[in-house]
Amino acid sequence: MATEEQVEAVVLNAASGNFAADNIANELQAIQEKLDALVNDGTSIWTAIFSILTFFALAGALIGLKKTILVQIEKLTKKTDTKVDDLLIDIIISFTKPLYAIPVSLYIATFIFPICAPINNLAEFLFLGSLVFFAISVVQKFILLLVDQLDSSKSQQEKANFNRNVSKATSFVFYSLGIIFVFDNLGFNMSTLVAGFGIGGMAIALAAQAVLGDAVASFSLFFDKPFEVDQPVTILGHSGIVKSIGFKTTHLSAWTGEEVVIPNSAVSGSVIQNYSGNRTNSLVSVSIAADTPTEKVDSLPTVLLRALEGHESEFEPLEAYFREFGPFCFVFEVRFQVKSSAPPAVRAATGKVNNTILHALLKEGINSPLPRQVFISEKPAF
């Protein structure tokens, strides 16, 4: 006969078995409910499949559109004289880049065939971000086209410098506003962030007054055009060729070989000498001894002009005349026109003129005034 302990063990084992069986049944029922929710009539699985197929179809169509139709249209627009059609086709082609085509395709696919909240929200975030950045790039391109149409006399290098400056100036503003717009549309409270930007912007503006002043001066230099790239200038005592006009500084290649970097604010507030003209007028002074015979003094202007002939590739003599009486000398002035405005060319022409005049004076037997000392010796009266 079974003891009480044996009976109690049998009852506990049966109870634990029933509990385990209940747990297994509950787990199986939960799994079955999940499977039913997932494959109920095949809707969720087919929605995901259709969404993926739609994504790949749209992305492939947008990217493939560039390689088939848009490339041919771009070749046709390059043959026209207007730049508006080039800009429009460039905007359309840039929209077919994977950077924009993939987020747009993903958003459209999940909008038509929603998969789940996280994926749908991610697709919306990527779509808004790419759309805002695409709109910013379009606005920047239109600004550059407008500036180019307003002043088409700029060289390609100048336009490249200005485009780089405009991109730097507008990118910070536009992209900051774009980021705020994207997060605001996703439901984030941007009021505090905008207020923080306002206070931070004031602090940055106060700390970067010099940088902002140079940036504003770069636009002033572009529109006022006191000089252009590759022109010889003298700025704040530094002479050289303008190499670039940047967002903050202007770079000169000095005649002595070094590179001079000048802040734009200092450039715009200084006196600028521009030697970009095709010709430069210059002059030299010639002094002859006061005891020169009168007939040689009278003929000297003609002699000098005749001696300076034959150098048309470097300079052209204009006039020579008796300018004034000096201490123990007669002063003549010779004016000539140099064929270049660059200071090195002017200096070379001046040296050639002086050398030619020296040989002409020696040939005519005309002496330069030299200091003389006269000693008077007197006998004593006693």
Image (tube, rainbow, N blue to C red):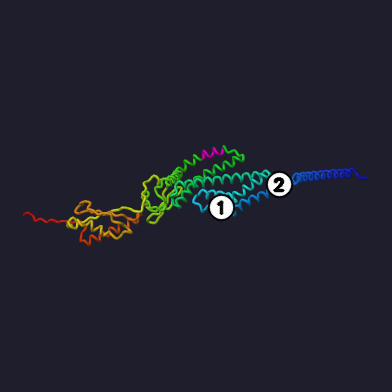
Q: Amino acid at mark 1?
A: Ile
Quadrant into which the C terminus falls: bottom left
Q: Position of residue 231 (x, y in %)?
A: 39, 52
Magenta highlight on residue 193: yes
> Which residue corresponds to mark 1?
73
Q: Nearer the viewer, residue 50 or 124?
A: 50
Quadrant into which the N terminus falls: top right
Magenta highlight on residue 229: no
User: Could you say which quadrant of the image residue 115 lies in?
Assistant: top right
Q: Residues within 10 Å of mark 1 (few under 14, many from 20)?
A: some
Secondary-structure class at tag 1:
helix
Q: Which tag, 1 or 2, sits closer to the chain's start? A: 2
> Which range is magenta?
192-200
Disc number placed over residue 274 in the picture, else none: none
The CA distance from mark 1 to mark 2 is 37 Å
Q: Is residue 313 left or right of residue 323?
A: right
Find out whether the residues at labels 1 and 2 contact each other: C-beta distance under 8 Å.
no
User: Could you say which quadrant of the image residue 188 lies in?
Assistant: top right
Main secondary-structure element of the magenta-colored stretch: helix
Q: Is residue 200 left or right of residue 314?
A: right
Q: Is residue 99 left or right of residue 22?
A: left
Q: Amino acid at mark 2?
A: Thr
Q: Is residue 356 left or right of residue 7?
A: left
> Which residue corresponds to mark 2?
47
Residue lying at 24% horizontally and 60% vertically, measured from the top left: 360
Q: Residues within 10 Å of mark 2 (few under 14, many from 20)?
A: some
Q: Position of residue 335 (x, y in %)?
A: 28, 54
Secondary-structure class at tag 2:
helix
